[in-house]
Image (cartoon, rainbow, N blue to C red):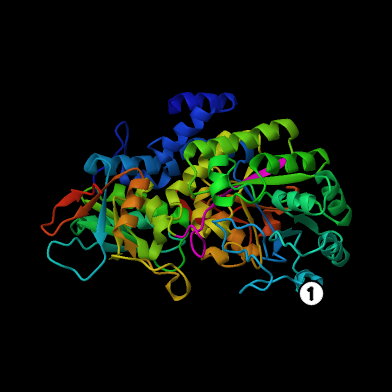
């Protein structure tokens, strides 16, 4: 498989094959792969780069699953470091943002698989947040959690989603996909739902009219063939339902977990994974460089290797910081705007469903400006 | 002014480097690096200088500078006698893409300087490795026998084990080489 052949396919809008994806991972010249991904990124979005104002709530880290890559979970409620928020504590996170006049548009909620919480803990959690701010978008519960609820409370997946939706659920986050390949999945997270089950939860959600995101954990024990296969399975579901908005490659963090002897993915591996994702997933609109995991500099660079979204302001991220992430736990909108502009891109504040909240002059506290990294004039220029 | 940069098919005069597309600039910088070093990447140990050590000359750069300003300073360095190694070092906050572009400019504007060096201490291992895609050919890092987990007070320890340094260079698609006591470079085969 030659890069020229892949380039022809990409420019003709043809989907790439498993062999094409593997060839992109193995191509010796990262720049050529990156430039092709950037071509697709700019064809889809031009220079526009998206972010949102969001808040993360991880209501409990008590989790029955013992995934080897996880530094967040505690197996039992009494274990050292284990916590479960009361509703008031969780709702207090939103009340604090409201009191600070922080116009967040989304709350991202992901938790451990707590064996002792009743289902109405979750429905009331959502309902209470909606009571505080009815307009807030609740992107909550990974497919792994939804599947766990279905098993634990003996409900069909569709009924779980319907009940959560009635309580305020608006969309699903993309976590828990990890890597679909049974060989690797069995070793690193064998006691959570399978790849097929993960996909089926999203299929059900899409059919019920919900949108969702999708992810891939990379950098543990998976092969490049397994990475590409994972992307192809997501692409196939997207062909079927069209419900995915964003693909988020998640870099493995090795500290504080059972895989701490593995090296973390390198910067080149990060950029290549983003570029290959943009090229393979021709039917998923957005590729998100999650700055919390990648680090701000790598995330910014990824904006030229296929990514068009930086995620959001976040606030209080716990899962990756317990795994050794060295990034801050929050960034201000002004910082995110500056990072995007300094990459030579145009920031667009979005809501969860990619409706534009603000762009252009509305995002520029110090005046509209741009910086042309591509052409090498990094002075900020005032533009009309 | 220094000699024009060469990428195999095209040449670019230094004064026009600032106008190049990011990917074109990077390709030219990588081609210039590879024409000298044939896709080899080097481990330089940050330590007290010893005989035969190559000690890079820092090239401080800051956020907000233009390419033209950087090229002017690089021309002055070249005019004073090209150093054996140049090491772009951000002063204050530096963004990823701006840093990588600076590496490409250093490679292309200093064709007589053998090494363009990525400093793991100031850039971090991820960005330092990415610099190999923009013309760098060497890592500058404290090399230790064993590294503690990057947690707590050790979170920002830039030290790498030899194996980690080799992994970064190989991961960038280059053949890892280390400098021997006699000043020669030897390919790492383990």
Q: Position of residue A119 (x, y in %)?
A: 83, 59
Note whether A19 is above or below A104 in the view shown.
Answer: above
Residue at 89% across / 53% down in the picture? A166
Note whether B2 is above or below A124 in the view shown.
Answer: above
Q: Position of residue B67 (x, y in %)?
A: 40, 53
Q: In the image shown, does A379 or A128 lie closer to the viewer?
A: A128
- Which quarter of the rendered picture does the N terminus of chain A lie within? top left
Residue at 61% across / 62% down in the picture? A319
Determine which quarter of the picture holds residue A86.
bottom right
Q: Is residue B2 left or right of residue A333?
A: left
Q: Where is residue A109 in the image (x, y as percent from the top left)?
A: 73, 59
Q: In the image shown, does A325 or A68 lie closer to the viewer?
A: A68
Label 1 residue SS:
helix
Residue at 54% across / 63% down in the picture? A323
Residue at 47% across / 70% down in the picture? B151
Total numbered badges shown on the rendered structure: 1
Residue A61 visible: yes
- Residue at numbered disc 1: A99
Q: Which segment did they paint magenta?
A: A244-260
Determine which quarter of the picture holds residue A137.
bottom right
Which chain hosts label 1? Answer: A
Residue A38 visible: no
Q: Does the magenta stretch include residue A307?
A: no
Q: Does the magenta stretch include residue A256?
A: yes
């Amino acid at each position: 498989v030659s890069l020229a052949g892949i380039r022809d396919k990409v420019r003709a809008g043809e989907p790439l094959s498993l062999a094409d994806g593997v060839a992109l991972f193995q191509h010796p010249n990262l720049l050529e792969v990156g430039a092709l991904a950037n071509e697709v990124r700019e064809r889809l979005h031009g220079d526009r780069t998206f972010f949102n104002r969001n808040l993360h709530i991880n209501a409990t880290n008590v989790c029955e699953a013992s995934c080897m890559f996880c530094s967040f979970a505690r197996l039992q409620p009494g274990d050292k470091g284990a916590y479960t928020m009361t509703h008031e504590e969780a709702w207090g996170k939103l009340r604090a943002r409201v009191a600070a006049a922080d116009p967040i548009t989304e709350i991202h909620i992901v938790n451990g698989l707590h064996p002792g919480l009743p289902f109405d803990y979750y429905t009331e959690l959502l309902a209470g947040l909606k009571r505080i701010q009815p307009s807030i978008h609740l992107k909550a519960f990974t497919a792994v959690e939804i599947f766990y609820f279905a098993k634990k409370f003996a409900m069909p997946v569709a009924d779980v989603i319907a009940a959560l939706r009635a309580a305020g659920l608006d969309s699903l986050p993309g976590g828990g996909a990890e890597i679909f390949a049974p060989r690797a999945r069995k070793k690193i997270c064998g006691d959570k739902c399978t790849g097929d089950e993960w996909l089926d939860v999203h299929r059900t959600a899409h059919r019920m009219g919900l949108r969702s995101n999708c992810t891939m954990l990379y950098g543990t024990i998976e092969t490049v063939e397994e990475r590409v296969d994972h992307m192809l399975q997501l692409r196939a579901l997207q062909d079927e339902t069209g419900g995915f908005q964003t693909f988020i490659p998640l870099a493995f963090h090795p500290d504080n977990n059972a895989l701490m002897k593995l090296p973390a993915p390198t910067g080149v591996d990060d950029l290549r994974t983003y570029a290959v994702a943009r090229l393979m997933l021709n039917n998923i609109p957005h590729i998100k460089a999650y700055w919390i995991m990648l680090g701000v500099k790598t995330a910014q660079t990824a904006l030229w290797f296929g990514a068009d979204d930086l995620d959001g302001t976040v606030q209080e991220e716990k899962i990756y910081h317990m795994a050794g992430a060295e990034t801050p736990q929050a960034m201000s909108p002004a910082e995110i705007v500056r990072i995007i502009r300094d990459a030579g891109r145009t920031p667009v504040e979005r809501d969860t469903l990619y409706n534009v909240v603000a762009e252009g002059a509305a995002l520029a506290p110090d005046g509209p400006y741009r910086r042309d990294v591509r052409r090498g004039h990094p002075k900020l220029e005032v533009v009309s | 002014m220094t000699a024009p940069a060469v990428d195999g098919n095209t040449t670019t005069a230094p004064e026009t480097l600032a106008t190049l597309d990011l990917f074109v600039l990077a390709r030219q910088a990588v081609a210039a690096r590879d024409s000298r070093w044939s896709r080899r990447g080097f481990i330089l140990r940050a330590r007290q200088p010893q005989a035969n050590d190559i000690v890079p000359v820092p090239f401080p750069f800051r956020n907000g500078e233009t390419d033209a300003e950087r090229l002017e300073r690089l021309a002055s360095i070249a005019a004073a006698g090209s150093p054996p190694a140049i090491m772009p070092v951000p002063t204050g906050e530096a963004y990823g893409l701006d840093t990588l572009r600076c590496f490409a400019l250093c490679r292309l504007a200093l064709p007589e300087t053998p090494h363009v060096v990525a400093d793991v201490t100031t850039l971090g291992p991820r960005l330092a490795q990415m610099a190999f895609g923009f013309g760098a050919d060497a890592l500058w890092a404290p090399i230790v026998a064993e590294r503690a987990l990057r947690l707590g007070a050790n979170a920002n320890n830039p030290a790498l084990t030899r194996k980690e340094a080799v992994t970064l260079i190989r991961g960038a698609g280059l053949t890892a080489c280390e400098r021997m006591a006699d000043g020669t470079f030897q390919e790492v085969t383990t």
